[in-house]
Amino acid sequence: MLPERSKEVARALRAAGVPGEIREMSGSTRTAADAAAALGCETGAIASSLVFLSAGQPVLVLASGRHRVDTRWLAEQLGWPRLEQAKPEQVRRATGQAIGGVAPLGHPEPLTTVVDSALAEHPRVWAAGGTPRTVFPTTHDELVRVTGGRSLSVVDERG
């Protein structure tokens, strides 16, 4: 039986036509390394959900687990004011979910979303299912579609 938050995410996934089912893992999938170990996949195939604020507005970044988001680079690419990491209470307010389990959808209101283009390198990626112990399989393109997001590199590719 899935936690209530994950049931909400499952309903949102079904409504969006996503075929992947949410799985509850026996251990934490709070970090990309934890999730990759539990799933037996590369860290880069984990879509880490990070919430930032730009001019006070929440922005969801679905980053490859192998990347650390370069907030200056990303804000520059988007033409936005700087991005600041959201505090835990801001994350919960924006998403209805706790840090370490933020799903790409199922939030009180749709969030502006950026999907790391590096996730396209993997035929299957894993995203959080609403809690730190739930995940679901998806793809880069599906994440862009269901979030209405924009695919961009989240790291400075100039080297």
Image: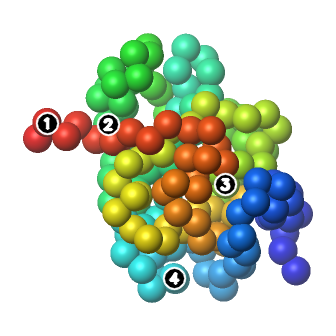
Neighbours of disc 1 within 10 Å: few (<14), some (14-19), many (20+): few
Q: Earlier in the sequence, mark 2 or mark 3?
A: 2
Mark 1 → mark 3, Cα distance in angstroms: 30 Å
Q: Amino acid at mark 2?
A: Asp
- SS of the residue under disc 2: loop
Most extreme residue toward the left, as rendered? 159
Reply above or below: 75 against 113.
Answer: above
Q: Amino acid at mark 3?
A: Ala
Reply above or below: 135 against 140.
Answer: below
Q: Quadrant of residue 126?
A: bottom right
Left or right: 20 as drawn, with respect to 42: right
Name the residue that disc number 1 marks.
158
Q: Quadrant of residue 153?
A: top left
Residue at the spot 55% in from the left edge and 14% down from the top edge = 55
Q: Amino acid at mark 1?
A: Arg
Reply above or below: 26 against 42.
Answer: below
Labels 1 and 2 touching (C-beta < 8 A): no
Name the residue that disc number 2 marks.
70
Name the residue that disc number 3 marks.
103
The x, y position of residue 57, in whole percent, is: 62, 21
Mark 1 → mark 4, Cα distance in angstroms: 32 Å
